[in-house]
Structure formats: structure tokens, C-alpha cells
Image: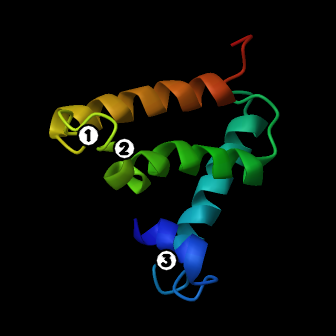
Amino acid sequence: MLWFQEASQNQGIYFKECNVLQLHEHLLEVLEQGMAQGYFRPLKPFLALTHILSVCLFYFTVHENWKHLMPEVDRLSASAIEQHTEEAIAFILAAVKRVDR
């Protein structure tokens, strides 16, 4: 939630303090290394990382709004977060993996 608020409202004021830049650089390196080694299809790393982070974070960012769609579902329960994590990983891997490997 903090990352979303920072990205949408604070024009990057706290990014350096939150160590986001180092994490971002590391994740870009992982994507670039995966492409270089042939595990990932050709990607534009910055855009791919933007999409990956969106898949991971949007679930939590919209929680307060989504709970009105299905109030009986606790999307922040351990089992719901585990299911989200598994689906996010499968979705991301399907998006970045080379098909011929």
C-alpha cells in the first residue's frame, strides 16, 4: 500500500528512503540474466517489471474496494494470500518463460 501511495501521490519523495531503487535494480538484473541465459523470452525489462509488480501489488492495493464486491471473502486471510501468490507466480512465469524450453 505504501508503494502504491508513493507512486501515485508523492512523486517519488520516499523511494530512496524505502530502498525501492535497489530492489528495482535487482529485479531488472534478474530479468536481464534470465533473458541472457535463455530462460526468459525477449522482454523489455522495465516494462516487464512494471507488469510483474502490478500483478503482485494490485491485489493488496484494491483490497478495501474489492471487499465490497464479495464481503464474505477475506482476501487477506493466509489461505487467500497463498492462493493469490501461487496464481501470481504462475501468471508471471507464463508471461516471461520461453515457450521452447
Of the image marks 1 and 2, the number of the one nearer the N terminus: 2
Which residue shows up at 65% across the image and 50% down it?
A: 49
Q: Amino acid at mark 2?
A: Trp
Any mark on residue 19, and which? Answer: 3
Residue 89 place in picture, x, y as percent: 46, 31
User: Which element is circle 3 on?
Assistant: loop
Q: In front: 22, or 60?
A: 60
Which residue shows up at 34% across the image and 50% down it?
A: 63
| Residue at the spot of label 1 | 75
Which residue shows up at 64% across the image and 83% down it?
A: 11
- Give above or below for 20 relative to 11: above
Q: In front: 7, or 33?
A: 7
- Give above or below for 16 relative to 1: below
| Residue at the spot of label 2 | 66
Density class for disc 2 (Cα within 10 Å; few <14, some 14-19, many ≥20) is: some
Of the image marks 1 and 3, the number of the one nearer the N terminus: 3
Q: Are marks 1 and 3 in contact (CB under 8 Å)?
A: no
Res 31 → quadrant: top right
Density class for disc 1 (Cα within 10 Å; few <14, some 14-19, many ≥20) is: many
Residue 14 place in picture, x, y as percent: 51, 86
Q: Amino acid at mark 1?
A: Arg
Q: Are marks 1 and 2 in contact (CB under 8 Å)?
A: yes
Q: Amino acid at mark 3?
A: Asn
Q: In front: 77, or 48?
A: 77
Which residue shows up at 22% across the image and 38% down it?
A: 71
How far apart marks 1 and 3 lie (CA) works out to: 27 Å
How far apart marks 2 and 3 lie (CA) works out to: 29 Å
User: Which element is circle 2 on?
Assistant: helix
Total marks in image: 3
